[in-house]
Amino acid sequence: MTAAVIDGKALAQEVRSEVKVRALALAEEGITPGLATVLVGEDPASRVYVGAKQKACAEVGIKVWDYPLPSSTPEDELLGLIADLNANEGVHGILVQLPLPEHIDEQKVLVAVDPLKDADGFHPMNLGRLLAGDPLVAPATPAGIQEMLMRSNVEVSGAEVVVVGRSNIVGKPIAAMLLQKAPGANGTVTVCHTGTRDIAQHTVRADILIAAIGRAHAITGPMLKPGSVVIDVGMNRTEDGLKGDVDFDAAMEICSQVTPVPGGVGPMTIAMLLSNTVMLAGG
Ligand code: NAP
């Protein structure tokens, strides 16, 4: 079997076109959606991510409020900026790029963001609403994964879904989203992590495997179920370039649909951030 590649770039372009239409409709009402991007420090990867998000905002008519801060920024100062952005009527979404420098308490900062301006969906109130099946805004990467599955006509309802990884930004929220009794969800979800005794025993049963591990090719061919769908969230910089968490060549032989790295989940994450921002602006 040769799998079909799920083209994240093309799907993201679809989403971005729809977001642009929503942003234009808001503009006709005199509202320019605004996203504040807060980047603390000089981490090169974070700068690339924030730059890509800002460029994408400009393309769909979202105004960017750019806050690059030195890595020495005191926590109080950052919290002060967040308070100002919460009060700024032109700012509808706030994105604090993670990770933050070690002297800053990440959780304190995420909680300080107004939940109604939480473009990344990381505020505990929004995560709680997500868990309760009444989301206001979903974290962008899991939202992008669900959108990809729906747009690729992958039936989640009734499927065995195995998520490898339990981070607060990917693994836990995507597991919570796909187990809801709702359209695009209703799966039977298993979550694996470093405490899982035999990961392959779970992954080999997965109709839909979502890998969010952060280790190049941690998922090998024998761990995959023939005919399954693989969503590879991993972005691992190796000597051979950017690699996913799944052995892509093996997955192409065994599975029915596979996301590439790069060009899979990454572009969808950006598209859903734009969608979240326009939604928070009322569109
Ligand atoms: P993270 O916070 O480091 O979490 C990784 C998770 O994987 C943890 O739950 C960890 O288990 C689990 N894990 C690590 N090694 C494992 C192993 N050998 N077997 C089973 N589980 C293992 O990472 P993250 O933020 O979720 O990101 C995961 C990957 O996705 C990274 O490569 C990241 O760059 C990428 N990512 C991509 C996007 C995108 O837009 N494409 C967005 C976000 C993240 P424990 O909890 O037990 O430690």
Image (spheres, rainbow, N blue to C red):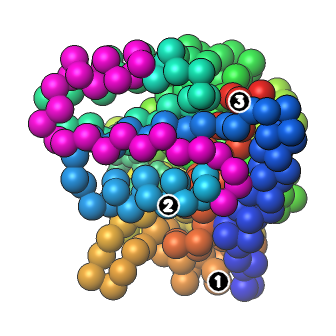
- Which residue is identified by label 2? 52
Q: Residue at x 17, y 32 (%)?
A: 73
Q: Between 132 and 78, which is closer to the camera in this rendering?
A: 78
| Vertical relation: 220 (above or below) 114 | below
Helix, strand or loop at mark 3: loop
Label 1 neighbourhood size at 10 Å, few (<14), some (14-19), many (20+)? some
| Residue 25 screen position, x and y as percent | 87, 41
| Residue 181 screen position, x and y as percent | 82, 27
- Which residue is identified by label 1? 253
Work out which quarter of the rendered image holds the N terminus and state it.
bottom right
| Residue 260 screen position, x and y as percent | 58, 73
Instruction: Name the N-terminal-most of marks 1 and 2.
Output: 2
What span is in magenta? 59-84
| Vertical relation: 67 (above or below) 237 | above
- Residue type beneath disc 2: Ala
Report if residue 74 lies within the magenta region.
yes
Label 3 neighbourhood size at 10 Å, few (<14), some (14-19), many (20+)? many
Instruction: Name the N-terminal-most of marks 3 and 1.
Output: 1
Examine the rendering and report whether any part of residue 42 can be seen: yes
Q: Is 235 positioned to the left or the right of 114 in the image?
A: left
Q: Between 139 and 2, which is closer to the camera in this rendering?
A: 139
| Residue 220 screen position, x and y as percent | 47, 71
Q: Label 3 vs label 2: CA separation?
A: 21 Å
Q: Is 38 positioned to the left or the right of 204 in the image?
A: left
- Which residue is identified by label 3? 281
Image quadrant in which you'd find residue 279: top right
Q: Label 1 vs label 2: CA separation?
A: 32 Å
Q: Residue at x 85, y 50 (%)?
A: 21
Q: Which marked residue is nearer to the observer: mark 3 or mark 1? A: 3
Q: Which marked residue is nearer to the observer: mark 3 or mark 2? A: 3
Instruction: Name the N-terminal-most of marks 3 and 2.
Output: 2
Image quadrant in which you'd find residue 228: bottom right
